Image (tube, rainbow, N blue to C red):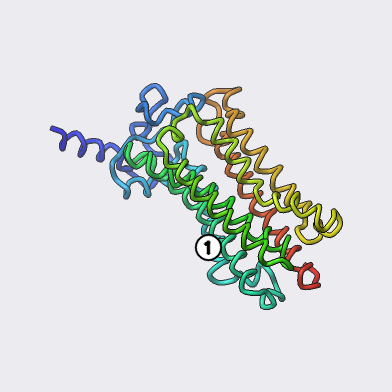
Amino acid sequence: MAVRTRMQTRKDCTPESPSLEPSKSHLVSWDNLESWRKDNKYITSDYRRVCYSYKECVKSAVHRHNELMNIHTHQIPAILLFACWLFSIDKIFPSYYHLATFPEKLSLSIFIICSGLCLCFSGTFHCFNSHSEKAWHTFQCYDHMGIILYGIGSAMPSYYYAYYDKPTVYYILWLALGAVAVGSIYFIFSPDFRSPVYRAVRARLYILLGSSSTIPTFMSLYIYGVDEISKRLDTHNLILEMFLHSIGAVIYALRLPESIAPGKFNVFGGSHQIFHLFVVAGITAHIISLRHAHAFLHNLSP
């Protein structure tokens, strides 16, 4: 009987046509949603049915449902970042990447990779969260771990450019950052942290990690002064990055705009999609800041 039930569930999840508008039978409302999937009551419908099939989850990525935009607003930028790292990282830092030292190239590569993993893990969670309860919890852990990786990746090159003439300092900071990362990832995989009750805690963690690259700014002001450090790190774009991540996290935590108009943003325009866009914008601001920092270090124009 259990086998027949699961087979029927899989059958119900299978799209009948390549249309971007799947049959309503493949979607469920908030009221009919499993308890472990209930995260945002203001998204009232267009949830995919649990299908116990990774293949069907992937197929659903081109159909209309409330995870459609959450998948693609992060997977597409992730693919672009990985492609840039593999084939054209020198194009991100044109004409002077060959001047970079090994620690500099390492930190820049780690930033691109960690940013790509952050977006990839997020998009993967949104793609497969209709597979099963176990898959939902597992991929949610990786989704949150991606935020940790982004905080690490964005901080590493900032530490390098702030203290490029003091290698002992940035190596110590890198080690400290690694220790914080291990502790944070352990916390991320704690079952309590994954519950909706900890939404506000997650938002504060996102703000902290999203702005971690600004930490060397405050540490180095005493050593180098405002004028010097603003050139070494391009603080204007780092502050912009922190602002973008903070605004996105606040929107995510407050569930805007769907909390004001429940049911109106089920598929397009929800808080999670907006949060995704702010994350991508923050990554872009950080890339621009690294271009300027790299150019200043090598006495070139960005």
Q: Is residue 14 above or below residue 291?
A: above
**x and y percentages locating residue 162 in the rendered image:** 73, 60
**x and y percentages locating residue 11 in the rendered image:** 25, 40
Q: Say which residue appears at 79% left-offset and 51% top-offset.
A: 236
Q: Say which residue appears at 20% left-offset and 39% top-offset.
A: 7
Q: Say which residue appears at 73% left-offset and 58% top-offset.
A: 289
**x and y percentages locating residue 145 in the rendered image:** 48, 47
Q: Quadrant of residue 229?
A: bottom right
| Quadrant, the N terminus | top left
Q: Is residue 104 above or below residue 272?
A: below
Q: Quadrant of residue 9?
A: top left
Q: Is residue 4 above or below residue 106?
A: above
Q: Nearer the viewer, residue 36 or 222?
A: 222
Q: Is disc 1 placed on a helix, strand or loop?
A: helix
| Residue linked to disc 1 | 82
Question: Label 1 sits on what residue type?
Answer: Phe
| Quadrant, the C terminus | bottom right
Q: Is residue 229 above or below residue 89?
A: above
Please say whether residue 129 is visible from this viewpoint.
Answer: yes
Q: How many marks?
A: 1
> In the picture provided, is 73 more to the left or to the right than 125?
right
Please say whether residue 62 is visible from this viewpoint.
Answer: no
Q: Nearer the viewer, residue 137 or 125?
A: 137
Q: Residues within 10 Å of mark 1 (few under 14, many from 20)?
A: some
Residue ranking furthest to the right: 227
